[in-house]
Amino acid sequence: MSTPQETVERALALSEADDCIVIVDEGSTANLRFAGNTLTTNGVARSSQLTVISVAGQGVGVVSRAAVRPDQLADVVAAADAAARDAQPSDDARPLIEGTSLDGWDREVEPTSIDIFRDFAPALGESFAAAETSGRKLYGFAEHIMTSTFVGSSTGLRLRHDQPTGRLELNAKSADMSRSAWTGVATRDFADVDVAALDASLAQRLEWSKRRVDLEAGRYETILPPTAVADLMIYLYWTAGARDAADGRTVFSRTGGGTRVGDRLSPLPVRLYSDPAYPGIECSPFVVAHASSREQSVFDNGARLGATDWIADGTLRNLLQTRHSAELTGLAATPQIDNLIMTGPEGGRSLEEMIASTERGLLLTCLWYIREVDPQTLLLTGLTRDGVYLVENGEVVGEVNNFRFNESPVDLLGRVAEVGASAQTLPREWNDYFTRTVMPAMRVPDFNMSTVSQAN
């Protein structure tokens, strides 16, 4: 078997196109799954993906294949070359990024293994025992992924990034299965996961839910915890493409033409940004684009990434830009980055302090089944899940029924009454795709619970 580095070099040598980019992703996964206070399965897996991007004039051919053997490599490269020759000119065609390199290109790939759980698994077992004694059941899974990405080009790029991604989802149910609570965390290596503390928070929520209060649909003062804020802000981020905004398709389009960059979105000094070097949620410091879209361009592969404000001091500062869209809009090229951070005013309070200062309102656990209703306003709909709690005079007094909500994250930024302290969190809805987030809790005075949901 060839190493990823050898595959890159050989594929570049085989290409007869004007230019060529080769991306190799070497992945490995380890996981634990559990139900009813018992470990049910565990396993490890390996994967390899090769992407060859050939450029002929302004035509591009892209071919991706999994588990390519050395004797199949020439066929993959030839297919990409042929596709490039047959392609129509690409409107995002630009000169490839000139050769740069990062340290570590020649290092061997170090896959993850079940050993990543060496300290976590015993702690999980202790929580199983504690839950069994207290009459609750724990369900969920822990997963760790290591992806090593190698990007080489005919213009001299030799870039590598090793990305660890870990997540734990933990669900507790009462003995009669009538009450449920959820929590989750993102981690790079599971060394920082406090299972006992997570289990204690779930036990508290199950205790809260012993009293049931039925409420009608309506607008309620609502505290959104960091996980729910993450799901909403991730969707905002995903839809912040500059080309769509410039074409009048999204909430970031300015009436009469252009984008809303420079518009005030929130009365509070909210900051929403990405930073590849942010501690705990580090991500690739260069563009990796396996295919072109309205938000990314294969011609930008290897472009360096740095801290980028999307919203600063409550004002929209940047949108997702390729070099091509930046020329169309007259704005800076600001490619997508694989993490997202939100902060509010300095001195933001903890979630517990926000609850203690609430006269009457709702406390959510998380959001689920989020779908877009109207791109022009970014109106989203979805459901609450695994616990909506009534807060009165600073204390949680019971669990209420679930709701369907209808809200726009952009509109919410304009109505937010308080932004709490920020902390690393795991989005519930989008954690299959996006885990690296640092988010605050938010207080909204009139969150729209549009209908009562029968979901349990």
Image: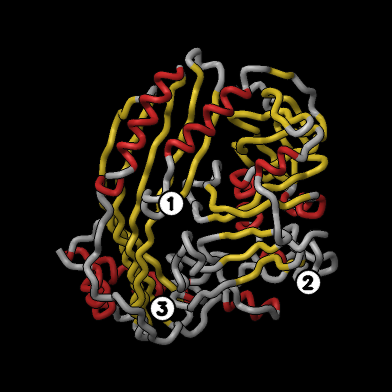
Q: Amino acid at mark 2?
A: Gly
Which residue is more in the foreground, 213 or 5? 213
Is the residue marked by circle 2 packed among few (<14), some (14-19), or many (20+) residues within 10 Å? few
For the C terminus, the image quarter is: top right
Residue drawn at x 30%, y 81% as measured from the top left = 16
Mark 1 → mark 2, Cα distance in angstroms: 35 Å
Q: Which element type, helix, strand or loop, lies under badge 1?
A: strand
Tell which circle, 1 or 2, labels the residue nearer the N-terminal end.
1
| Circle 1 residue | 187
Foreground tag (3 vs 1):
1
Residue at image location 29% in from the left, 71% down from the top: 77
Pick out the residue farthest to the right.
256
Using residue 74 as the reference point, say whether residue 18 is left or right of it: right
Residue 98, located in which quarter of the rendered image? bottom left
Circle 3 crowding by C-alpha within 10 Å: few under 14, some 14–19, many from 20: many
Q: Nearer the viewer, residue 412 or 188?
A: 188
Residue 14 in which image quadrant: bottom left
Q: Which residue is mark 2?
A: 262
Task: Using the image, tell me which numbered label, if any, was put on residue 55.
Answer: 3
Q: Earlier in the sequence, mark 3 or mark 1?
A: 3
The amino acid type found where label 3 is placed reads: Val
Q: Is residue 453 shown above or below 42?
A: above
**Dot 1, crowdedness within 10 Å: few (<14), some or many (≥20)?**
many
**x, y (%) of residue 241?**
64, 64
Which residue is painted at 70% across and 80% down in the image?
330
Q: Position of residue 291 (x, y in %)?
A: 46, 65
